[in-house]
Amino acid sequence: MRRRSPAALSAVLTLLLAGCATSANLPPAYHPPRPPGAKALQDGVKKAAAEVKLTGGLETTDVRHSDHGPGSYFVCLRQRGPSGDRPPAYSVFFDDDAYKGIQSSVILDACEAQPWASFD
């Protein structure tokens, strides 16, 4: 009977274990959400306005990062009205180009402190 050396046995075990390690078992790399593109923003705001039944002219703010709400980025949305009569503001949330939902704006969103622009 031939005796095997511990080094040879170690090499064989190392090769066997290396064959079991595959990249398929690794979790996907994390990519942080990015702001929505122009088309996704337009589509998301239109969908959000329809959900809360806003009609007529709309106004939005610039896209900003969010640390609350259903998405990582948001814009403020409101129906255009006379300057003395401020309609309620909503926050429209996105992750990448995906619309994530709309909710009534809260103080933390600081929508009223933002510059508003007509949304067309």
Image: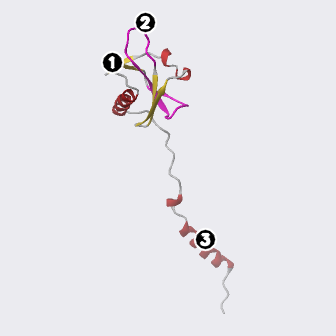
Residue at the spot of label 3: 14
Residue at the spot of label 1: 57
> Do labels 1 and 3 touch, CB within 8 Å?
no
* Callout 3: SS: helix
Left or right: residue 7 compared with residue 89: right
The quarter of the picture where the N terminus appears is bottom right
Amino acid tagged 3: Thr
What percent of the width, then of the height, locates residue 110?
A: 52, 19
Q: Main secondary structure of the magenta part?
A: loop
> Do labels 2 and 1 touch, CB within 8 Å?
no
Q: Residue at x 64, y 78 (%)?
A: 9
Mark 1 surroundings: few (<14), some (14-19) or many (≥20) residues within 10 A: few
Amino acid tagged 1: Gly
* Callout 2: SS: loop
Please report whichever mark, 1 or 3, sits nearer to the chain's N-terminal start: 3
Mark 3 surroundings: few (<14), some (14-19) or many (≥20) residues within 10 A: few
Q: Residue at x 52, y 63 (%)?
A: 22
In the rendered structure, does residue 79 fall within the stretch colored magenta?
yes
Please report whichever mark, 3 or 2, sits nearer to the chain's N-terminal start: 3
Q: Is 44 situated above or below 5?
A: above
Amino acid tagged 2: Gly
What percent of the width, then of the height, locates residue 19?
A: 53, 69
User: Which disc number belongs to residue 84?
Assistant: 2
Mark 2 surroundings: few (<14), some (14-19) or many (≥20) residues within 10 A: few
Q: Residue at x 41, y 16 (%)?
A: 116
| Magenta range | 63-88
What is the distance, in whole Å, between disc 2 and disc 1 at their CAs? 16 Å
